[in-house]
Amino acid sequence: MDEKGWGYLTTYPEHFLSFTLTTIGLAALTFYMAYFTKKSSGAKNVHELKIRSIRGIILALGTYFLSNYLIWILFAGDTWNNWYAWFLGHNMDLWMLSLPLLGLPLLFHNDRVN
């Protein structure tokens, strides 16, 4: 693949989808995590933190990695390029794919204390 710049993104739609998910989605998640961290910095103990926000962050981060991996498997096929080499090479053991498994029990956690 010899394209560079926008040509690289528009050659195949999955490149544009993955790039958009990374630049917009991951940036939005980063800003929300910074906001949540600032808002939660005054908590005296763990019980004062909002579990709902924590589980949303964990699920969103894990879903980002899972969706990027699935985009490569479903759409790229045998096409190996620099984008997937960088993305999967820096997450070679794919440990971030387990984050949704951590976030799902938190999703169904009851926030009320008896």
Image (cartoon, rainbow, N blue to C red):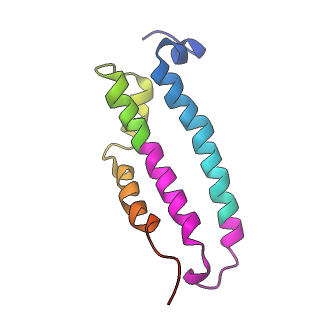
Residue span colored magenta: 37-65
Specify the quadrant of the image occupied by residue 22: top right
2 lies above or below 21: above
Residue 14 position, x and y percent, is: 46, 23
Residue 33 position, x and y percent, is: 62, 58
Quadrant of the image containing the N terminus: top left
Q: Is residue 104 magenta?
A: no
Magenta part, dominant SS: helix
Specify the quadrant of the image occupied by residue 99: bottom left
Q: How many marks?
A: 0
At 54% from the left edge and 35% from the top edge, which residue is drawn? 21
At 43% from the left edge and 61% from the top edge, which residue is drawn? 103
Q: Is residue 44 magenta?
A: yes
At 40% from the left edge and 55% from the top edge, which residue is drawn? 100
Residue 2 position, x and y percent, is: 46, 9
Relative side of 85 to 24, left or right: left
